[in-house]
């Protein structure tokens, strides 16, 4: 299973790089989480920022690949539900894209392209922290599907 994490922001702080790598590198048995960083746009207008970043995000999504947009207003799924989706996609194409916006959020064009919107909580989280949380949940989902003892739920 290949998961393309496509995220706004090209200069993550050290703790984010380390946290992300910690989980991405633990994946095994044919699973890969690969990160594509999209440059953050600058403007005082949040909608304009999101629209400028949309092009870069959408260009990085491969055609025909299931696409999940992370959005605080999205569906709140359990880790087991994440794992069930990954399991289905791993048997149908073996690839999915996971999108994280920047300070201005995700533009309507990105949300329209997305097949699903997933929330991590109703809280607005900093986008760099979301990267680490997504990597941990992908790893947790993998452990669940592989019977690894990391996930005890
Ligand atoms: C600082 S947030 C953007 C907040 C923006 N004002 C909005 O309304 O979406 C940056 C990005 O992190 C992700 N994000 C932040 N909180 C989230 C949450 N609770 N669940 C899922 N994704 C979240 C989203 O991809 C969002 O575009």
Image: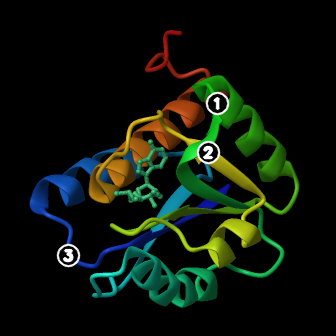
Along the viewing direction, whichever of 33 and 39 lies nearer the viewer = 39
> Which residue is at 35% across, 81% downward?
45
Relative side of 106 to 7, left or right? right
In primary-sequence order, the first of circles 3 and 1 is: 3
Query: From where the camera sits, is residue 27 visible?
Result: yes
Element under disc 2: strand
Looking at marks 2 and 3 on the same chain, the residue that comes earlier in the sequence is marked by 3
Task: Name above or below for residue 3 compared with residue 44.
Answer: above
Q: Quadrant of residue 10?
A: bottom left
Query: Which residue was labeled with disc 3?
Result: 11
Disc 2 packing (10 Å; few <14; some 14–19; many ≥20): some
In the rendered image, the vertical position of residue 35 relative to residue 137, given as above or below: below
Count of numbered circles on the image: 3
Does any atom of ligand 1 lie closer than 8 Å to the CB of label 2?
yes
Q: Residue at x 63, y 61 (%)?
A: 2
Please give the name of the residue rendered at 62% of the width and 82% of the height, measured from the top-left corner.
58
Within 10 Å of the Cα at label 1, are there few (<14), some (14-19), or many (20+) other Cα atoms? few
Q: Residue furthest front?
A: 45
- Secondary structure of the residue carrying tag 3 is loop
Measured as percent of width and height from the top left, residue 143 is found at 54, 29
Categorize mark 3 by other alpha carbons within 10 Å: few (<14), some (14-19), many (20+): few
Observer-nearest residue: 45 or 116?
Answer: 45
Residue 96 lies, in percent from the top left, at: 69, 61
The quadrant of the image that shows the N terminus is: bottom right
Residue under label 1: 77
């Amino acid at each position: 299973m290949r998961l393309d994490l496509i995220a706004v922001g090209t200069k993550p702080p050290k703790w984010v790089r380390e946290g992300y790598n910690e989980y991405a590198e633990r994946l095994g048995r044919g699973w890969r989480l690969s990160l594509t960083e999209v440059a953050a746009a600058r403007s005082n207008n949040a909608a304009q920022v999101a629209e400028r970043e949309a092009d870069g995000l959408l260009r990085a999504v491969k055609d025909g690949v299931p696409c999940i947009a992370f959005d605080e207003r999205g569906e709140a799924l359990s880790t087991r539900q994440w794992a069930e989706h990954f399991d289905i996609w791993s048997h149908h194409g073996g690839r999915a894209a996971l999108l994280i916006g920047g300070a201005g959020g995700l533009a309507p064009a990105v949300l329209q392209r997305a097949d699903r919107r997933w929330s991590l909580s109703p809280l607005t989280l900093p986008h760099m922290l979301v990267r680490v949380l997504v990597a941990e949940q992908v790893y947790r989902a993998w452990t669940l599907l592989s019977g690894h003892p990391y996930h005890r739920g």
